[in-house]
Image: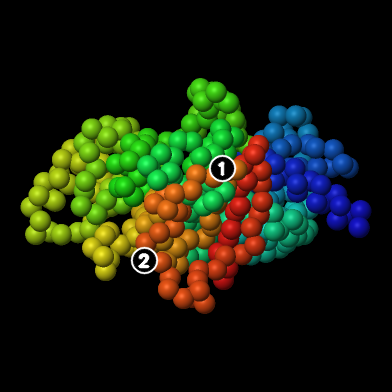
Amino acid sequence: MEKQREDERWMARALELAKKGLGHVSPNPMVGSVIVRDGKVLGEGFHEKCGELHAERNALADCRRRGHDPAGAVMYVTLEPCCHYGKTPPCTEAIIENRLGRVVIGSPDPNPLVAGKGTEILREAGVEVDGPVLEKECRALNRIFFHYITTGKPYVIMKYAMTADGKIATATGDSRWITNQASRNHTHLTRKQAAAILVGIGTVLADDPTLNCRYEDENGQPDLWEAPSQAGHSPDPVRVISDSRLRIPMDSRIIGSADRQRTIIAYAEDPDNADLQKRAAMLQSAGAELLPVPADAEGHADLAAILNRLGEMGLDSVLIEGGSRIHFSAAASGMVSEVQVYIAPKIVGGQEAKTPVGGEGIPVMADCIRLGAPEIRQFGEDVLLTYRRKE
């Protein structure tokens, strides 16, 4: 029992370290590692940036910097050590070379290149391997990585903010602001983690958004980014606009910054439409990427096709912050893995005021899209309900 408590204690610390990589390691997983002997930390590390050293090697380097010899010590790592050559050499080699006595893993690695092989190599070399420890927490941290590596499809998060009476805007279309600053900053933390953010053309025409990551203080003024990773401004997600007829204005803030922040405009392909092709050429000249996809039954760019193409392009996660029509299309596609609902203690009423999910809707309650029980967080007076898709 004492050994189990110790393992959980140090794995919890490794998880804290892993979170520091949020927004910087995609499409790799966030991983943290701690090296311990006799209850004392010899070294710590986390995967800091895609293409750079993994958590295990960073922890070993930290151990050496502190003047410690890791031989015989215990290494805690949130994910099974890799055993293949990629942008960095295998972590199993470093563990064996440094003669660690025991390795405790948080979760097995579902990557087919690892998938138990790392554990097997360590054991064959005489290293004791235990785990998983805090597996649920370790898997939750890397839910995006686990989903993408096993399915090849992006992990899709649908997010919206609404009033207590279920409105995303007033009857006049005003929506600034439904939630408080703390809730909006948390939204930007989710943007920081996502590879791409997707909205419909209706949102662009109504709000002229920038769709970047930013942090603001309680007065709405820009401030240093404060997140579980590190202070400083975060990288922005790829912007994806579902714009069936390419109506996005050339003077919009998105097109005006397309040469600085990667921007993909998805539209319903129509090779015989000369005006559409001319418009596509103009957008490309402004720095946007054009993504033609088949049209759905209503003539809109097929959302499932867009999401599948984004996965093929290496984008492992997509945050959808669209309007009510695109939210229904996303939910109906069966590709939404998570729904984040921010609820503000406000009532606006209005029969014409928009609700979060519109579209044609589902006619029979028995056919509804089912979600699991929510996780609940509070930001001041606002509440965030996070649902995961019920399999």
Q: Is residue 361 left or right of residue 188?
A: left
Q: Which residue bears the numbered disc 1?
A: 346
The circle on residue 208 is none
Residue for point 57% across, 48% down: 164
Badge 1 marks a residue whose secondary structure is loop
Q: Which residue bears the numbered disc 2?
A: 360
Residue for point 75% across, 49% down: 11
Instruction: Name the quadrant containing residue 108.
Output: bottom right
Q: Is residue 342 visible?
A: no
**Farthest front residue in view:** 350
- Give the Cα distance between marks 1 and 2: 27 Å
Instruction: Name the quadrant containing residue 13.
Output: top right
Residue for point 66% across, 43% down: 378
Q: Position of residue 5 (x, y in %)?
A: 86, 52
Q: Is residue 268 visible?
A: yes
Q: In the rendered view, would you say 197 is above or below 285?
A: below
Q: Nearer the viewer, mark 1 or mark 2?
A: 1
Amino acid on which disc 1 is placed? Lys
Amino acid on which disc 2 is placed? Glu
- Which residue is at the front of the view, 31 or 323? 323
Q: Position of residue 70 (x, y in %)?
A: 77, 41
Q: In the rendered view, would you say 307 is above or below 13?
A: below
Badge 2 marks a residue whose secondary structure is loop
- Of pointers 1 and 2, the one earlier in the residue sequence: 1
Q: Is residue 29 left or right of residue 151?
A: right
Q: Is residue 40 left or right of residue 297?
A: right
Q: Quadrant of the N terminus?
A: bottom right
Query: Callout 1 environment at 10 Å: few (<14), some (14 to 19), or many (20+)?
Result: some
Q: Position of residue 77 (x, y in %)?
A: 70, 49
Q: Quadrant of the C terminus?
A: bottom right
